[in-house]
Amino acid sequence: MARSVTLMVTALLVRFGSAVAQQAGSDLAYEPELPPDLNSPHGSLWPLPQNVQISPELYRLSEVQFRIVHSPQSTASVGCSILDNAFRRYFNYIFSSSAKTDQRGSGINGASSRSTEELRQLQVTITATDPECNQHPRISSNEAYEISVMQPVAILKSESVWGALRGLETFSQLVYEDEYNTHLVNKTEIVDAPRFAHRGVLLDTSRHYLPVKVILETLEAMSFNKFNVFHWHIVDDPSFPYQSITFPKLSAQGAYHPVTHIYTLTDVQIIIEYARERGIRVIPEFDTPGHTQSWKGQNNLLTPCYNGEKLSGMFGPINPVLNTTYDFVNQLIKEISWVFPDAYIHLGGDEVNFECWKSNPSITQFMQKQGFGSDYRKLESFYIQNVLDIVTANLKGYMVWQEVFDNAAKIKPDTIVEVWMASNMKAELSKVTLAGFTTILAAPWYLDYIKYGQDWQKYYQVEPLNFNGTAAQKKLVIGGEACLWGEYVDATNLASRLWPRASAVSERLWSSEETKDLNDAYKRLSKHRCRMVRRGIPAEPLFVGYCDYEYKG
Ligand SMILES: *[C@@H]1O[C@H](CO)[C@@H](O)[C@H](O)[C@H]1NC(C)=O
Ligand SMILES: *[C@@H]1O[C@H](CO)[C@@H](O)[C@H](O)[C@H]1NC(C)=O
Ligand SMILES: *[C@@H]1O[C@H](CO)[C@@H](O)[C@H](O)[C@H]1NC(C)=O
């Protein structure tokens, strides 16, 4: 959101260009010495688990012997495809094939391989009667897990598959290679669970179209960082790439290209399933009544603007005074509720420009009839209220941007209010939670803003609960989102702009409040970033240095 703010700040940067960059560089607290010592007592773990004990005792893993298996006590077994697939995936990450094609070391005859015991298995135990193999992750899913790495078998234990997915990622991060390419793991005990339940990444597929493959790669990288929500800002002013079954004209006329730049039902279902397999919820955002210029494929939906007495030929936000508007919204919401299985839909509701509504005589008339005076926020709330009732009737919960709350629409008690305005963020968090609403924080994490230097530190140092409120109020903050708005982002630069900067957000939302040592974070994040590179994600560097396995494209 905050597109108007973006323009202002951009203008500033253009004008004061190098001075701003200079200053941005100098206010960074920590610039590591060269060459940096990258040895953290927590290895390369990211985000840092809540409780970790790593001992100096080492075990070796061999690609030929090692197996990830269901334990005999587990309530899940072979056929729980979400786990079977994850076992395969993580086996491959651990014994990544890029190692073999690289010109380093001599393989199996390393010194450490002779002197250490071998770890033969990782046994995974699910304890709940229903392991949830075929379900979708929910806001209430239990992601807690425990790992015990001890010779001859390591144990991973969780209530449901969701904790096991997080634990598999952690286990894969414990394994490393020595200089002879021997795979090693330290004796380790971990007890872990996320601090916040909602840990999201927002992608914007309206300002630029993102190919399905890029979205899948992002979901994969999200799972390396234990993110669990993909907030899909799927449509907006510039384009409408969602191919609706009920209203195919929306993408036929609103997408950048009606065939090549759309998401079909199959595309959407592939994305949802790929996300599910990684414990990630997909929450679509259909932002209205503003941000809808691309919805022009639906006749009589947008408000015709006037220039004095005459139609100007321009269109404004969705027309809130026509009954047909709500018939349309009802049918669209019905479809979206079916296509997207998550319990929540994001309804937007931000930055509505009232100028066009003000120019339109039938809207003026309606305002008078309703007794709204000249307060167009009341008209906006009237529209939002109708939409909220429609969504409720379709048995979905909703998320909204903060303006919906600010403008006093009557929202359901389980509404999630997303706070995005950075200037008054703390006051807003106090207000929203005082009113008893659940909230998530996006304001400090607009990753589309870039500047010289290590800006991950700024994202990392945010403390979401640092606002005035009671313990009960703070409980209502259930997480946050790293937002990558799409003005200057498409498939060419998405991954390197998002990673590892979003990783800073992932640790803030997963790890304990006390996890805030920038020095230790730098060491682990440098390695985590190289691990993402090794797994095929072109994550950008933090600072001067190198990776054992550089990105090869
Ligand atoms: C793992 O064990 C090795 C060998 O004892 C030790 O040097 C290293 O510090 C340990 N790693 C961690 C993260 O404690
Ligand atoms: C719109 O619906 C309301 C409520 O059902 C009704 O009172 C009103 O007459 C309708 N308006 C038009 C223009 O059909
Ligand atoms: C909390 O309220 C006090 C007193 O009104 C104020 O001084 C302080 O700055 C506030 N803290 C935050 C984090 O907003």
Image (cartoon, rainbow, N blue to C red):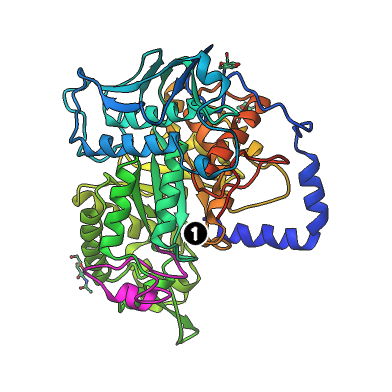
> Magenta stretch: residue 251 in it?
yes
Q: Nearer the viewer, residue 308 or 31?
A: 31
Q: Residue 46: x and y, percent?
A: 52, 30
Is the residue 119 above or below the residue 208 in the image?
A: above
Is the residue 518 above or below the residue 206 in the image?
A: above
- Left or right of 539 in this view: 77: left
Q: Is residue 177 visible?
A: yes
- Name the image quarter holding residue 305: bottom left
Is the residue 355 above or below the residue 471 in the image?
A: below
Q: Nearer the viewer, residue 231 or 166?
A: 166
> Magenta stretch: residue 232 in it?
no
- Left or right of 172 in this view: 489: right
User: In percent of the image, x 20 and y 55: which residue is there?
Assistant: 338
- Name the image quarter holding residue 131: top left
| Label 1: how many Cα within 10 Å (few below 14, some 14–19, many 20+) | some
Q: In which quadrant of this rendering is ligand 2 seen? A: bottom left
Q: Residue 525: x and y, percent?
A: 60, 34
Q: Residue 213: x and y, percent?
A: 41, 58
Q: Nearer the viewer, residue 299 or 117?
A: 117
Q: Nearer the viewer, residue 381 or 344?
A: 344
Predominant secondary structure, magenta span = loop
Task: Report if the beta carbon of the residue with label 1 is closer than 8 angstroms to ligand 3.
Answer: no
Residue located farthest toward the bottom when viewing the structure as drawn? 310
User: In percent of the image, x 38 and y 60: which residue is there?
Assistant: 212
Q: Residue 249: x and y, percent?
A: 29, 76
What residue span does the magenta drawing correspond to?
Answer: 234-261
User: In percent of the image, x 42 and y 27: which residue is there?
Assistant: 62
The amino acid pointed to by label 1 is Glu
Q: Element type at marker 1? A: loop
- Left or right of 236 in this view: 422: right
Residue picked out by circle 1: 351
